[in-house]
Image: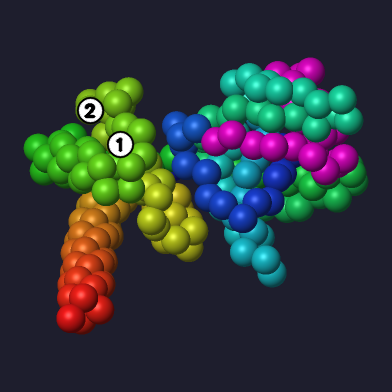
């Protein structure tokens, strides 16, 4: 579902921002110090697009500045941002010191809120709890509204452990059901791999302890 076109400042980064997710940023380059200062003064958002080192993706997400966390004497800033609207780039503009783009916003298509979709969302939240426990992260799901299925789909799609390429594919999807379904399946596979890795590590460490014990016994004799 497409919306209006608009020109926005662009910040290519080696990451993928999802709508509704928080992202802290350290601003240190002169052009981006200028860009962020203008965004703060004019109360406007900027776009974040995934840059893989050779090319910029043409679909990204706007970042809304929530607060300036710290200002440094040399103009550097730590800021807290939150993902907002997704966009597709139609034209790049290099007239300013920083990159700008003429973009068109888009959103998911309207889909019926089926019980299957709600079940997927609940399963996804349960998997996030397992992931946080395995990776010793804070509860990323704590403030999520279980009724907002689109936000939940982005929360799961933005999980740590997915590659940026995987996250980019999730970002570009326009079906909440498709994103939720594929992200939940991917998260389930990720957790299974993490559990297997932890199990193997435990076995290896156990074998190491056995070897140390045998060596100690051999030394004593």
- As drawn, is 204 to the left or to the right of 95? left
Residue 74 percent coordinates (x, y): 88, 30
Q: How many marks?
A: 2
Q: Say which residue appears at 44% left-offset and 55% top-offset.
A: 167
- As drawn, is 187 to the left or to the right of 66? left
39 to 7, vertically: above or below: above
Q: Say which residue appears at 30% left-offset and 26% top-offset.
A: 142
Residue 168 percent coordinates (x, y): 48, 56
Kindly identify which residue carries mark 2.
Answer: 146
Residue 68 percent coordinates (x, y): 68, 21
Q: CA distance from mark 1 to mark 2?
A: 7 Å
Rendered-image quadrant of the N terminus = top left
Q: Which scheme is used to colour this image of the protein?
A: rainbow
Task: Check residue 40 for magenta coloring.
Answer: yes
69 to 56, vertically: above or below: above
SS at mark 1 in the image: helix
Q: Is residue 56 visible?
A: yes
Residue 67 percent coordinates (x, y): 63, 19
Q: Which residues are magenta?
A: 23-44
Kindly identify which residue carries mark 1.
Answer: 152
Asked if labels 2 and 1 touch by Cβ distance under 8 angstroms, the answer is yes
């Amino acid at each position: 579902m497409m919306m209006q076109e608009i020109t926005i400042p662009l910040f290519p980064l080696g990451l993928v921002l999802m709508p509704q997710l928080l992202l802290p940023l350290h601003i240190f380059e002169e052009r981006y110090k200028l860009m962020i200062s203008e965004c703060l003064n004019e109360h406007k958002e900027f776009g974040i697009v995934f840059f893989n080192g050779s090319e910029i993706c043409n679909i990204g997400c706007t970042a809304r500045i929530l607060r300036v966390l710290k200002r440094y004497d040399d103009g550097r800033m730590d800021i807290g941002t939150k993902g907002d609207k997704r966009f597709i780039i139609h034209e790049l503009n290099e007239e300013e010191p920083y990159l700008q783009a003429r973009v068109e916003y888009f959103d998911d298509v309207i889909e019926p809120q089926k019980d299957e979709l709600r079940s997927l969302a609940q399963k996804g939240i349960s998997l996030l709890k397992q992931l946080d426990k395995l990776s010793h992260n804070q509860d990323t799901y704590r403030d999520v509204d279980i009724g907002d299925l689109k936000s939940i789909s982005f929360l799961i799609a933005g999980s740590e452990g997915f590659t940026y390429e995987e996250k980019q594919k999730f970002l570009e999807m326009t079906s909440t059901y498709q994103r939720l379904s594929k992200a939940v399946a991917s998260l389930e596979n990720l957790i299974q791999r993490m559990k297997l890795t932890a199990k193997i590590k435990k076995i290896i460490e156990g074998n190491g302890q056995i070897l140390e014990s045998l060596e100690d016994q051999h030394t004593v004799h």
